Image (cartoon, rainbow, N blue to C red):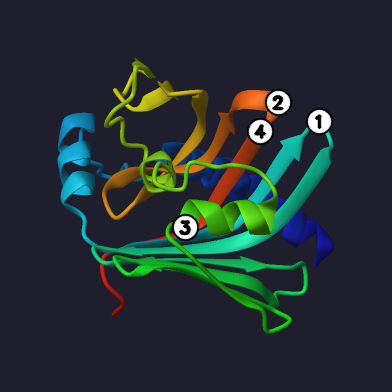
Amino acid sequence: MRHYRTLLLALFLPLLLDACASLTPPKVEPTLTLPSEERTQVLQSLKEWQASGSASIQTPQGSESFSYRWRQSPSHQELSIYDPLGRTVARLTASPDGAELQTIDGKREKAESLEVLLDDVLHVQLPARELPLWMLGLTNGASAVHRDAQGLPETLSRGAWDIHYLRYAAVGGLQMPSLLQADGPDGVRLRLAVTRWQLGADS
């Protein structure tokens, strides 16, 4: 019986190998994404979006890491900052009426702009009005822009800040930043990773 099985294997193994060699691997369709110019038009007309992920801030005095969620709409901005356990350490909101900060210990503070409150929480001066443009990868108002082979922003300068786009990811037909680094004055460096994008209103 063993000799019979060996004989069958010797007869059929070459046929099996030939059949496998003739099979072509399945084609993986490339993700369809809009060209750079059309991408910019879509993002500039986008009214509502959300981004969440992790961030780190480095200064000559030290560094700090946290998770975040940014929500943007025409009349409202909201930035939630989380600790490693997922607890909301601070929530900052801004509207035409002003900005407000709520912290995990129940503290509430109001200011004229989100930028003032962001400084209170992170202890660095970040251009809060510019942050949505940085995150979307829009070049509005940039003094210098360098693009990659696909026409996407690779580096750009805004005032005292230089933004480097280190990685993009396809999101709903758009190439969206998934990792960026912003180098600012006084040795401040912001590194921002976006792990989830939601383009449009809540479903």
Q: Calculate the distance from the C-alpha at mark 3 to the C-alpha at mark 2.
A: 22 Å
As shown in the figure, which amino acid type bears the numbered disc 4?
Arg
The residue at the point 51 percent across, 35 percent down is: 167
Please, is residue 4 above or below residue 64 in the view?
A: below
Residue behind mark 4: 189
Label 2 residue SS: helix
Please, is residue 145 above or below residue 11 in the view?
A: above
Q: Answer whether labels 2 and 4 touch (C-beta < 8 Å).
A: yes
Label 1 residue SS: loop
Label 4 residue SS: strand
**Residue 203: % across, % down:** 29, 80
Mark with earlier residue (3, 4): 3
Q: Calculate the distance from the C-alpha at mark 2 to the C-alpha at mark 4.
A: 6 Å
As shown in the figure, which amino acid type bears the numbered disc 2?
Gly
**Residue 117: % across, % down:** 56, 59
Label 3 residue SS: helix
Residue behind mark 2: 187
The residue at the point 37 percent across, 37 percent down is: 137
Q: Answer whether labels 3 and 4 touch (C-beta < 8 Å).
A: no
